[in-house]
């Protein structure tokens, strides 16, 4: 080594030691981000992917099942998950945590709820709502050719694992659960019912774009108690699981593969700082479901309009 190069090298080493957040560089391998089947998750994943790219990271998106993804993160095949909804994914997340390999990378600011929901005109026909018992007494209003003498409840796609069928059985409800093939099928159902104000009850969640489009309410089931999905004695029916609603104030977490912190330390630090609010998440969904942008475009628009939000996580 010549003296001047030696000095440079020593200088760089000292600078690295003295830098307040001295860290190794992130790996150039792609950070693998999973994409699921509801709009906010897709837009948020692209937004965060674009943030990582702006930091010089490589990013790859994979479309995965929203339950199996926790096993993939645990094994490091997928690097992280940006939307761990307590109601839909709490059980799969906890199971993966117990096996090891993934960890809780912090909560978003958002408070979430996922459950049976109706647009407000439904209440005109069934004024005892939002009580689940009142809904059950109004089951006739929801009868269709498909469900015969039972009311129709349009649940989400099967991979959101809402346990609608188990709940109907556990509470002795006069409803038949039909699984929608996609989130879009839920919006189509509400939209079709709107014209003649037909009563409908469908799976919905918050934060979502739907709350700004169709005022509505969640059905109030027996309150969620820890263990309702594991211990039959928990909840009003002593012999059944799933005899209560989903958490009414659920968390929204980020999850990360344990190896992320060593392999992409800068991206990991940003991940831990990321925290979206209900309004921000609803806006991400709206850009796709109402404004009809492609998810990548929606992510770009969101980042452009919210630089003050995300730049504070990066700097
Ligand atoms: C998982 N989801 C937010 C669609 O309920």
Image: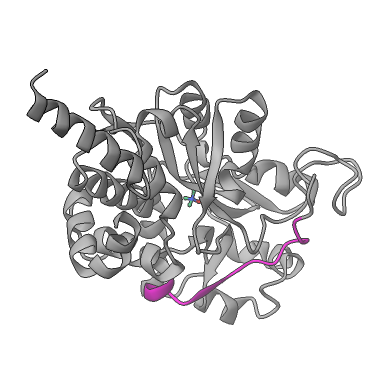
Relative height, residue 306 to residue 74 (above, below)? below
Residue 150 x/y as whole percent: 65, 52
Q: Nearer the viewer, residue 47 or 114?
A: 47
Q: Is residue 263 left or right of residue 288?
A: right
Left or right: 184 as drawn, with respect to 291: right
The residue under the point 60% across, 45% down is: 162
The residue range painted magenta reads 211-224
Q: Specify whether 64 is left or right of 301.
A: right
The mark tally for this picture is 0
Q: Nearer the viewer, residue 217 or 303?
A: 303
Q: Does the magenta portion include 175?
A: no
Give the answer, above or below, for where 37 lies relative to 130. Answer: above
Residue 262 located left or right of residue 89? left
- Does the segment drawn in magenta span residue 215? yes
Question: Which residue is drawn at the image coordinates 88% and 49% (left, top)?
Answer: 237
Q: Quadrant of the C terminus?
A: bottom left
Give coordinates of residue 99: x percent, y percent. 64, 24
**Where residue 286 sits in the image (x, y, percent)?**
30, 65
Which residue is at 78% across, 49% downward?
A: 226
Q: Can residue 60 be seen from the camera position used here?
A: yes
In the rendered image, the residue lying farthest to the front is 3
């Amino acid at each position: 080594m010549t003296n001047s190069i030696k000095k440079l090298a020593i200088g760089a080493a000292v600078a690295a030691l003295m830098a307040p957040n001295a860290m190794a560089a992130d790996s150039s391998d792609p950070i693998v981000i999973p994409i699921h089947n509801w709009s906010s998750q897709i837009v948020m994943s692209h937004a965060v992917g674009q943030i990582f790219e702006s930091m010089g990271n490589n990013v790859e998106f994979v479309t995965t099942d929203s339950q199996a993804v926790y096993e993939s993160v645990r094994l490091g095949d997928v690097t992280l998950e940006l939307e761990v909804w307590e109601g839909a994914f709490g059980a799969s997340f906890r199971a993966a945590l117990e096996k090891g390999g993934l960890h809780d990378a912090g909560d978003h600011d958002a408070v979430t709820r996922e459950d049976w929901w109706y647009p407000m005109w439904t209440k005109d026909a069934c004024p005892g709502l939002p009580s689940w018992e009142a809904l059950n007494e109004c089951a006739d209003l929801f009868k269709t050719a498909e469900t015969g003498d039972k009311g129709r409840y349009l649940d989400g796609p099967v991979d959101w694992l809402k346990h609608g069928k188990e709940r109907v059985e556990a509470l002795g409800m006069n409803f038949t659960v039909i699984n929608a093939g996609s989130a879009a099928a839920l919006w189509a159902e509400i939209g079709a019912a709107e014209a003649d104000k037909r009563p409908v009850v469908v799976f919905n969640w918050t934060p979502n774009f739907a709350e700004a489009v169709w005022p509505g309410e969640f059905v109030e089931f027996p309150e969620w108690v820890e263990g309702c999905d594991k211990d039959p004695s928990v909840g009003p029916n002593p012999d059944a699981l799933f005899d209560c609603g989903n958490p009414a104030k659920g968390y929204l977490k980020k999850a990360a593969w344990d190896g992320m912190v060593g392999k992409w330390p800068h991206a990991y630090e940003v991940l831990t700082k990321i925290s979206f609010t209900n309004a921000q998440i609803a806006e991400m969904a709206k850009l796709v479901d109402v404004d009809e942008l492609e998810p990548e475009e929606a992510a770009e628009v969101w980042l452009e309009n919210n630089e003050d939000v995300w730049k504070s996580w990066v700097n």
